[in-house]
């Protein structure tokens, strides 16, 4: 699955969750909550309506109410499961890559690493290192995990 379709699914999941919690929410508020343009919310809502996941009714003259249909509830559940499965897959792959590199680090005679990067992948790296008895420090001239998004590169074992 490509990143763009994954982002679209995450937005649809978020929209369905927001609408479920507040059917009277407007598109401007949804856009702010999702950190996207109102036009993006409108496009996603039109897609969800076309899929039969959401229905629209008039609450007042200019106010709309969004209603999640049974199909929408099923879609939300599927999107949530897909999201969790992708997240665990990233978690497992990251841990395995770090463990494989820890073997190389130990063979080279090191018991410490430096991690360059932030975010969830950095947290997974730190936890895996600590669990494996490798100290995470901020020193030069030791093996370093350099993180770029989901990519992990081990440097400093030359």
Image (cartoon, helix red, strand yellow):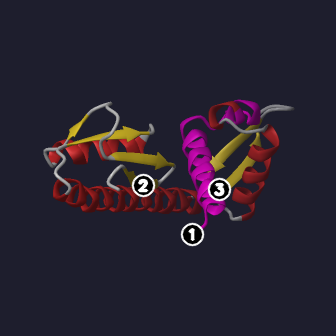
Is residue 5 shown left or right of residue 154?
Answer: right
Q: In which quarter of the image is the N terminus?
A: bottom right
Secondary structure, mark 1, is loop
The answer to whether 4 appears left or right of 98 in the picture is right
Name the side, left or right, on which 12 lies relative to 136: right
Left/right of residue 153 with respect to residue 41 in the rendered view: left
Residue 97 lies in quadrant? bottom left
**Dot 2 corresponds to which residue?**
153
16 and 89: which is toward the camera: 89
The residue sitting at the left extreme is 133
Q: Which of 124 and 38 is in front in this view?
A: 124
Question: Magenta segment range?
Answer: 2-31
Residue 147 on image: x %, y %? 45, 47
**Mark positioned earlier in the residue sequence (1 or 3):** 1
Label number found at residue 1: 1
Picture disc at residue 8 = 3
Front of the two marks 1 and 3:
1
- C-alpha gap between disc 1 and disc 3: 11 Å
* Disc 2, SS: strand
Q: Is there CB contact under 8 Å for labels 1 and 3?
A: no
Instruction: Give the class, few, some or many, for how many residues have Cα within 10 Å of label 1's Cα (few <14, many ≥20).
Output: few
| Dominant SS in magenta | helix
In the picture, the quarter occupied by the C terminus is: bottom left
**In the depicted structure, whether residue 152 falls above or below residue 71:** above
Res 39 quadrant in image: top right
């Amino acid at each position: 699955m490509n990143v763009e379709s994954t982002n679209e699914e995450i937005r649809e999941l978020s929209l369905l969750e927001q609408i479920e919690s507040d059917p009277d929410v407007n598109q401007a508020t949804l856009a702010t909550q999702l950190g996207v343009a109102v036009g993006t919310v409108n496009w996603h809502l039109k897609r969800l309506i076309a899929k039969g996941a959401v229905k629209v009714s008039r609450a007042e003259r200019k106010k709309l109410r969004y209603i999640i249909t049974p199909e929408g509830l099923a879609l939300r559940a599927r999107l949530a499961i897909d999201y969790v499965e992708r997240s665990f897959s990233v978690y497992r792959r990251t841990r395995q890559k770090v463990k494989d590199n820890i073997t190389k680090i130990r063979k080279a005679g090191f018991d410490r690493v430096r991690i360059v990067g932030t975010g969830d992948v950095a947290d997974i790296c730190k936890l895996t290192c600590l669990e494996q008895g490798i100290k995470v420090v901020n020193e030069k001239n030791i093996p370093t995990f350099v993180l770029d998004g989901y990519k992990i590169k081990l440097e400093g074992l030359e």
